[in-house]
Amino acid sequence: GAGVSQSPRYKVAKRGQDVALRCDPISGHVSLFWYQQALGQGPEFLTYFQNEAQLDKSGLPSDRFFAERPEGSVSTLKIQRTQQEDSAVYLCASSLQTGGRETQYFGPGTRLLVL
Amino acid sequence: DAKTTQPTSMDCAEGRAANLPCNHSTISGNEYVYWYRQIHSQGPQYIIHGLKNNETNEMASLIITEDRKSSTLILPHATLRDTAVYYCIVRVALGGSNYKLTFGKGTLLTVNP
């Protein structure tokens, strides 16, 4: 069945450039999560949505990071004025959310390299 | 946040059982233990989760000690494709019925032919 998909899979940006990363969750999944994974580290939580509402953005590293999910399905993570320290894999996950079905299913990630 | 401790790496022979330990001595009574794995260049893959009873599915078994301070993930017949980083996670409530996953560095399991 269709899982979580992310695009692009790879992105190379020049420092200072803006980038937009897309996540298509599993159809019908209410909750959507973004994580950042630096090289050699485990993923770290960035933010999460329940439908179109962004309920927690405590993990966003700076105000250059912005996420949206306007219609409660597809989500976009935008990074403005990229810096070299933003180089990482950005992972999206979704879950059905309710009634004990909170298991998060991850996409393949977008590997961002900022030069 | 409840913290987990895992060995950095482990080896296992193909066809044998792989037993991956995890300590979570500060876990609270209502916190679940989740296991994910990440094969190189892929997103994390859900394996199994549990609260206090042992659990089994088509991928693995999860054994949780009675005091819940530690658990063991068992892959009954490891194959080369099971080579991955295995993460033991105690999920953290975000409010409502949602949770974030706090990953550590995990255990790199290498299955050898």
Image (spheres, rainbow, N blue to C red):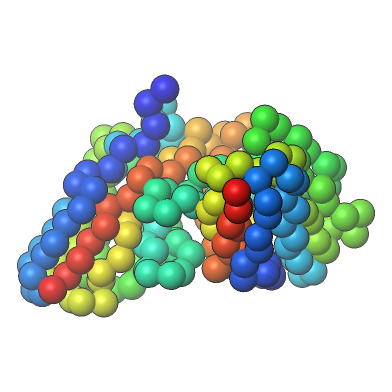
Closer to the camera, A81 or A6? A6
For the point 24% across and 41% down, the residue is A70
Residue B25 in picture, x, y percent from top left = 79, 69
- Decide: is B50 above or below A81: above
The residue furthest front is: B113
| Quarter-of-image position of residue A84 | bottom left
Residue A45 in picture, x, y percent from top left = 44, 61
How many numbered discs, if any? 0
Residue B43 in picture, x, y percent from top left = 42, 48
Q: Is residue A67 visible?
A: no
Closer to the camera, B111 or B62? B111
For the point 25% across and 71% down, the residue is A86
Query: Taking B61 as reference, is B68 left or right?
Result: right
Closer to the camera, B104 or B51? B104
The residue furthest top is: A1
Residue A102 in picture, x, y percent from top left = 57, 40
Closer to the camera, A10 or B109? B109
Q: Is residue A17 visible?
A: yes
Which quarter of the figure is the N terminus of chain B placed in?
A: bottom right
Query: Taking B73 as reference, is A79 left or right?
Result: left
| Quarter-of-image position of residue B4 | bottom right
- Decide: is A79 above or below B49: below
For the point 42% across and 22% down, the residue is A1
For the point 37% across and 69% down, the residue is A38
